[in-house]
Image (cartoon, rainbow, N blue to C red):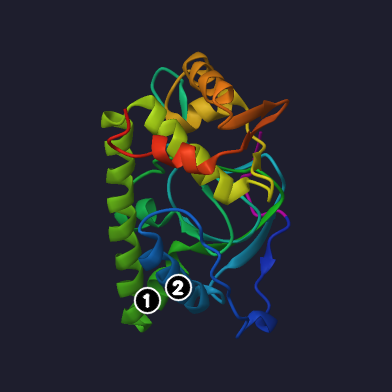
């Protein structure tokens, strides 16, 4: 992956973007109903504060441990949010798509980045620096309230993810993650372009453990495994395995 230290092809947001309607296709992340509407209000309020960045596939926007000097809005494309353990093991936390905001926790708390964000495909983001954001919050207290709502919802979502990783069995975690990925990156036929190694990073497990469960589901005709991905054939049965009390 390439590390980008400056905006490169970034350019100032054109005034032609003022009043651009924003559609709500936010499909993931914390407390979807609350965050989706909050994101849309924030995007409209902040779209003249930053610079556009056309991000090439594979580009790392920031890395875990970096200082936080801005927040971002996804305008198009998909980005991966991941963390790396001290032992070097990668865990994928989320996949971001259009109309989602990220990077606000570290910026507002003054802490370093808690995760790494990279582009899974060619994407466009809006980068908003700390100073213009703080000035806008001082002028418009409502903006600060919306950001606070987003931060609270994000913290709740993070707590839920930690709870799932800590207490839920792997089969439940894997079923939930596959259903989630189907909605985010799946095609109309239920095919998900994801490797078993990557699924392990999503579910917090080894490739071997994931492969064993997928093999069982394949024999039950819940999924099909093809080169480069997985196809969900019985989402109803997979949803049963995503339940907390599944046994």
Q: Which span is picked out in magenta? A: 1-8
The percent coordinates of residue 149 (x first, y second) are: 30, 67
Q: Is residue 101 magenta?
A: no
Residue 200 against residue 158 in the figure, above or below: above
Find residue 241 and name its label. none
Instruction: Please indicate whether residue 112 sits to the left or right of residue 219 in the image.
Output: left
Q: Is residue 7 magenta?
A: yes
Find residue 42 and name its label. 2
Residue at image coords 27%, 37%: 163
The percent coordinates of residue 4 (x first, y second) are: 64, 44
Label 2: how many Cα within 10 Å (few below 14, some 14–19, many 20+): many
Nearest to N terminus: mark 2 or mark 1: 2
Residue under label 1, please give it: 143
Task: Choose between 86 and 74: the one closer to the eye.
Answer: 74
Instruction: Please indicate whether residue 83 sits to the left or right of residue 52 in the image.
Output: left
Instruction: Give me the C-alpha separation between circle 2 and circle 1.
Output: 7 Å
The percent coordinates of residue 75 (x first, y second) are: 62, 63
Say which element carries label 1. Answer: helix
**Whether residue 116 is visible:** no
**Is most of the magenta stretch helix, strand or loop?**
loop
Residue at image coords 51%, 57%: 27
Label 1: how many Cα within 10 Å (few below 14, some 14–19, many 20+): many
Residue 234 against residue 212 in the figure, above or below: below
Residue 228 against residue 62 in the figure, above or below: above
Residue at image coords 49%, 28%: 201
The percent coordinates of residue 134 (x first, y second) are: 38, 70
User: Quarter of the image holding residue 145?
Assistant: bottom left
Residue at image coords 73%, 57%: 9
Quadrant position of the C terminus in the picture: top left
Quadrant position of the N terminus in the picture: top right
CB under 8 Å between discs 2 and 1: yes
Instruction: Please indicate whether residue 117 sits to the left or right of residue 36 in the image.
Output: right
């Amino acid at each position: 992956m390439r590390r980008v230290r400056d905006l490169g092809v970034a350019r100032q947001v054109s005034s032609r973007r003022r009043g651009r309607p924003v559609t709500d296709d936010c499909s993931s992340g914390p407390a979807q109903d609350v965050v989706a509407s909050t994101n849309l209000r924030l995007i409209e309020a902040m779209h003249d504060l930053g610079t556009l960045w056309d991000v090439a596939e594979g580009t790392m926007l920031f890395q875990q441990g970096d200082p936080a000097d801005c927040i971002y809005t996804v305008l198009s494309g998909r980005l991966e949010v991941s963390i790396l353990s001290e032992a070097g093991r990668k865990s994928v936390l989320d996949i971001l798509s259009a109309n989602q905001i990220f990077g606000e926790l570290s910026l507002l708390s003054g802490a370093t980045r808690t995760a790494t964000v990279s582009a899974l495909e060619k994407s466009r983001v809006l980068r908003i620096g700390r100073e213009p954001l703080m000035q806008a919050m001082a002028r418009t207290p409502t903006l600060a309230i919306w950001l606070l709502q987003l931060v609270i919802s994000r913290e709740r979502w993070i707590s839920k993810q930690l709870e799932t990783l800590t207490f839920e069995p792997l089969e439940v975690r894997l079923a939930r993650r596959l259903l989630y990925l189907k909605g985010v990156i799946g095609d109309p036929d239920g095919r998900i372009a994801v490797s078993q190694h990557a699924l392990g990073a999503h579910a917090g497990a080894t490739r071997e453990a994931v492969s064993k469960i997928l093999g069982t589901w394949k024999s039950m005709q819940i999924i099909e495994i093809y080169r480069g991905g997985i196809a969900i054939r019985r989402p109803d049965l997979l949803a049963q395995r995503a339940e907390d009390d599944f046994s």
